[in-house]
Image: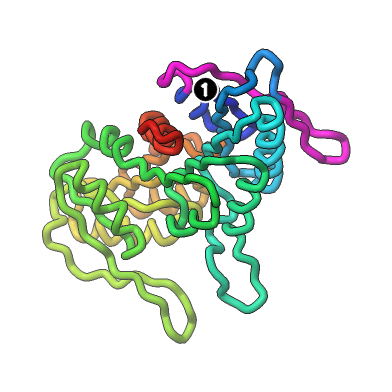
Amino acid sequence: MFVVSLSCDPGIGRAVAAEAGWRYCEAVRKVFPDGERYVRIPEDCSLKGERAVVVQSMYPNQDSMMVEALLAADALKGVTGLEPIAVVPYLAYARQDRVFLSGEAVSVRAVLRALHSAGYGGLVVLDVHKEDSLKHFRGTSVNVLPVNTLAKALKGVVERPLVISPDKGAARRAEALSRALGTEYRIVEKFRDRFTGEIRHRFAPMPEIRGRDVIVVDDIVSTGGTMASVVSFLREQGARKVFVAVSHGPLTKKALARLMDAGVTKIFSMATTCYRLEHPLITYLKPVGEVLQAIKEVLGTG
C-alpha cells in the first residue's frame, strides 16, 4: 500500500500513511497555459501490483480538483494495474442529490459515476450530504462520521455537556456524538414557510440547557446564518457555553462574525478542505484514525 496526495489534500494523506506505516508520496501536478491539468505519479513512488490510496478534497476550485482526481486514477491504474482507492474529505456537488425541477442533473450522481469510471474501485468520504447518495458509486464506499475525533477534542473543554441537532437531518450525528460523550441530545425543529419558502427554526423552551455547556453538531457551516440563529437561542436559554462542532467548515468571514455576535464559544471543524479561516475561535481537526479504519473497510481488512 502507498498513499498519494494531490493538490487539495488537507494534510490527511501524510498523516494516514504515517499511522498505517505505508509509503507516502505527492503526485507531480502542473497547469498548462490553456488551464488544463497535468498529473504524473513519480517512478519511485509506485510499483506494479501495489494498491494506492489517493487523497484529494474538492474545495475550493471544485472543477479543477475533480479533474485532477480523475487523471490520477487513470495514471495509477496504468502504473500499478490495480484500482486505486479515493479518499475525498469534501465531496463536491453533493448537495444536488435529487431532481427538484424537471430537466435538472443530479450532480452527486454524475460525480460519483465519473470517479468509478475513471478507475477508482473504492471510495472514502467524510460526512457526505446524504449518505444514500453513495449508492451511485459502483465500487465499495464508506461514509465517515468523525464522531470520535470530535468527542476527543471536546471532552477536555466541556462541562455537563448537552448535544443539540439544529434539525432532524443532523439527528444521527447528534445521537452518535452524545453517545461518545456519555450524555443526551435534543433536536431543534426546522420548518419551511409555506408562503415564502424561507427556512426557519421553531424554538421551544429547553429548561435543561441552563448552566450547561451545549454542543451544536451539523455537517457543514458556510454562511453561518442558520447556526448563528441556533447559537443565539441557546444563549438566551441560559447555556453556559455554546460550541459548534461540524465536519466541514468553509466559513466565510461574515459567517464567523455572525457566530461571534450570537455568542459562540468555540468552533471545531474537521480539516476537510484546502481553505482555512485562521482565527483563535476555530480549531481544525484531522480524523486520521477514522479515515484509516474506513480505508481498511474498503480493503476488507477492517
Position of residue 278 relative to residue 14, above or below, is below
Q: Is residue 48 left or right of residue 228?
A: right
Give the residue displayed 20% in from the left and 39% down from the top: 158
Mark 1, other Cα within 10 Å: few <14 / some 14–19 / many ≥20: some
Most distant residue in the right direction: 33
Residue type (three-letter) at the residue carrying disc 1: Met
Position of residue 237 relative to residue 55, above or below, is below
Q: Kindly tell me whether residue 283 is visible in this rendering.
A: no
Residue 47 image offset from top left, x and y in percent: 63, 18
Magenta stretch bounds = 17-40
Residue 143 image offset from top left, x and y in percent: 42, 46
Give the residue displayed 57% in from the left and 36% down from the top: 274
Give the residue displayed 49% in from the left and 29% down from the top: 12
> Which one is in front, 257 or 118?
118
Residue 50 image offset from top left, x and y in percent: 57, 23
**Quadrant of the snapshot with the C terminus:** top left
Magenta segment includes 105: no
User: Which residue corresponds to mark 1?
Assistant: 1
Position of residue 134 relative to residue 45, above or below, is below
